[in-house]
Image (cartoon, rainbow, N blue to C red):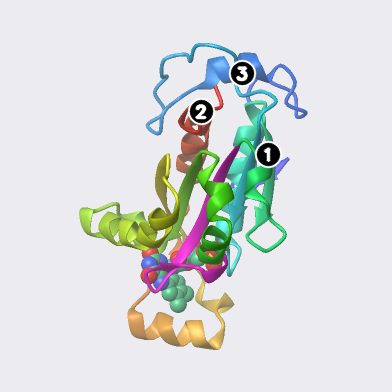
């Protein structure tokens, strides 16, 4: 199994996720990579999670897939789906929802999903992640703009956690309208994604989402 930054293997387990409870106990780390207290009770093995994303040029999709893969390594059943009308958040024990920022906002597919599914999303633990070039530098200013993009989302659902990940801007891939905005708005090109940061966050999710 490969992720975008090379070979990806579940640590200490086979690729079907068997023996994942012991892995969950061994590999719990927080975002800085330090070991954190072992949770009491059984792990999240057998629980189901929806990782749902909006993505225009694929970089957020790859981050969502990385989160899904990391959670599978912990023995959790994960579906990773694009935000759309055929997605039913109420069918899962928890939901992780992500979108890139475009001109300071989440993509409309993700915002529509939250609005349309607010009742079912209100009934399950939810964590979100936002992706943007600005999050390569987690200054107060950038975090405030990231939080501002979540204000619509927080109107509808209580979030267990919100992460902000650096994204990718590849001018060669942009549609003409996005290219025009990119030029005028001074969007910074480059692939700033940090998949280890993404994986570290994913490892915190079973506890954050109350799955263990
Ligand atoms: C036209 C345009 C507008 C953008 N606006 C923002 C923004 O307001 N804030 C930000 O942090 N990143 C912004 N970005 C960067 C994207 O969020 C980043 O490239 C993200 O990784 C794209 O995700 P995707 O590949 O899944 O579509 C913008 C990029 C483009 C091309």
Which residue is nearer to you in this view: 18 or 210? Answer: 210
Residue contact between numbered discs 1 and 2, judged by CB atoms under 8 Å? no
Residue at 41% of width from left, 15% of height from top? 37
7 horizontally vs 139: left or right = right
Residue beneath disc 1: 78
Measured in 3D between alpha carbons, the distance from the residue under mark 1 to the one under mark 2, in whole angstroms, is: 15 Å
Q: Which residue is mark 3?
A: 23
Q: Quadrant of the C terminus?
A: top right
- Mark closer to the observer (1, 2): 2
Range of residues picked out in magenta: 94-109
> Which residue is at a point 38% across and 58% down the rendered structure image?
150
Q: Mark 3 near mark 2, Cβ–Cβ under 8 Å?
A: no
Q: Tag 1: Cα neighbours inside 10 Å, few (<14), some, or many (≥20)?
A: many
Residue 167 position in % (x across, y down):
46, 59
Which residue position holds label 2? 210
Sequence-first disc among 3 and 1: 3
Crowd tier of the residue under label 2, counting other residues whose Cα lies within 10 Å: few below 14, some 14–19, many 20 or above: some
Measured in 3D between alpha carbons, the distance from the residue under mark 3 to the one under mark 1, in whole angstroms, is 16 Å
């Amino acid at each position: 199994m490969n992720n975008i930054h090379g070979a990806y293997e579940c640590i200490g387990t086979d690729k079907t996720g068997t023996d994942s409870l012991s892995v969950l106990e061994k590999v719990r780390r927080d975002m800085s990579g330090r070991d954190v207290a072992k949770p009491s009770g059984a792990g999240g093995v057998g629980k189901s999670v929806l990782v749902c994303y909006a993505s225009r040029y694929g970089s957020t999709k790859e981050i969502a897939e990385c989160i899904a893969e990391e959670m599978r390594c912990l023995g959790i059943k994960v579906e990773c789906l694009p935000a759309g009308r055929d997605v039913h958040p109420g069918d899962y024990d928890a939901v992780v929802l992500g979108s890139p920022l475009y001109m300071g906002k989440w993509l409309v597919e993700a915002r529509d999903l939250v609005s349309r599914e607010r009742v079912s999303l209100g009934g399950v633990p939810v964590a979100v992640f936002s992706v943007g070039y600005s999050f390569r530098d987690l200054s107060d200013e950038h975090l405030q703009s990231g939080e501002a993009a979540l204000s619509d989302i927080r109107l509808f659902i209580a979030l267990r956690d919100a992460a902000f990940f650096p994204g990718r801007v590849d001018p060669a891939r942009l549609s003409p309208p996005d290219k025009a905005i990119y030029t005028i708005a001074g969007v910074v090109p480059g692939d700033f994604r940090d998949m280890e940061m993404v994986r570290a966050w994913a490892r915190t999710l079973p506890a954050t989402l109350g799955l263990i």
